[in-house]
Image (tube, rainbow, N blue to C red):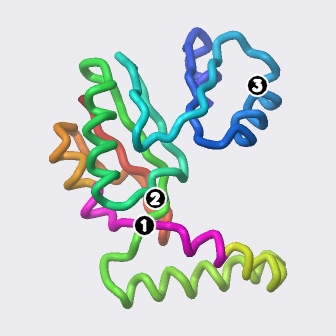
């Protein structure tokens, strides 16, 4: 989507999984505008100065302290006015809301025809998630020095958060 709107963009993809990056290489079919790095986002130098940093369904795997540190690193890696966008899984703001999120997800996937075996595998994967509330993450982004911090979209446990340097 970034290349569709900004065809001259230079993109650098970072993932801790070589398999994920291999899928990206196949998808982008050798596009010279895209480079790749195998690295753990929690402890890698992000470089910079980037106009845009995007994370999708990754940061929720980190403990809260690591999220806070990462938001600071992202702020430091952005150019002045640069934008950070995080499409992420989030925690409900209390136990009742979180239980409703879980029930809604289960209803939706069953309605889509997902097998009980696949649901069990998904629950196993989700046991490694370390989701945090929208409210906490927005505050941590502000604490890291990002401005214009906002939740631009939210549907149950999925949200898009953003902030600028």
Q: Which of 85 and 125 is in front in this view?
A: 125
The residue located at (31%, 83%) in the rendering is: 94
Callout 3: helix, strand or loop? Answer: helix
Is residue 78 found left or right of 9 in the rendered image? left
Callout 2: helix, strand or loop? Answer: helix
* Sequence-earlier tag: 3 or 1: 3
Q: What segment carries the magenta color?
A: 123-137
Callout 1: helix, strand or loop? Answer: loop
Answer above or below: position of 149 versus 64: above
Name which quarter of the figure residue 128 lies in: bottom right
What residue is shown with label 1?
131
What residue is shown with label 2?
60
* Sequence-earlier tag: 3 or 2: 3
Name which quarter of the figure residue 28 lies in: top right
Q: Which of 22 and 162 is in front in this view?
A: 22
Residue 54 is labelled as none
Q: Are marks 1 and 2 in contact (CB under 8 Å)?
A: yes
Instruction: Name the spot of residue 79 as percent of width and height, x first.
Output: 30, 18
């Amino acid at each position: 989507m970034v290349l569709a709107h900004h065809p001259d963009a230079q993109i650098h993809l970072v993932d801790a999984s070589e398999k994920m990056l291999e899928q990206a290489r196949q998808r982008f079919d050798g596009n010279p505008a895209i480079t790749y790095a195998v690295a753990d986002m929690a402890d890698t130098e992000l470089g910079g100065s980037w106009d845009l940093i995007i994370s999708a369904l990754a940061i929720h795997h980190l403990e809260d302290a690591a999220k806070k540190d990462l938001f600071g690193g992202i702020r430091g890696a952005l150019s002045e006015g640069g934008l950070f966008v995080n499409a992420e899984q989030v925690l409900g703001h209390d136990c009742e809301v979180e239980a409703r999120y879980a029930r809604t997800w289960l209803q939706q996937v069953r309605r889509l025809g997902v097998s009980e075996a696949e649901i069990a595998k998904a629950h196993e994967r989700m046991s490694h998630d370390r989701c945090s509330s929208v409210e906490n993450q927005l505050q941590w982004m502000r604490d890291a020095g990002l401005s214009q911090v906002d939740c631009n979209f939210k549907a149950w446990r999925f949200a898009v958060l953003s902030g600028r340097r």
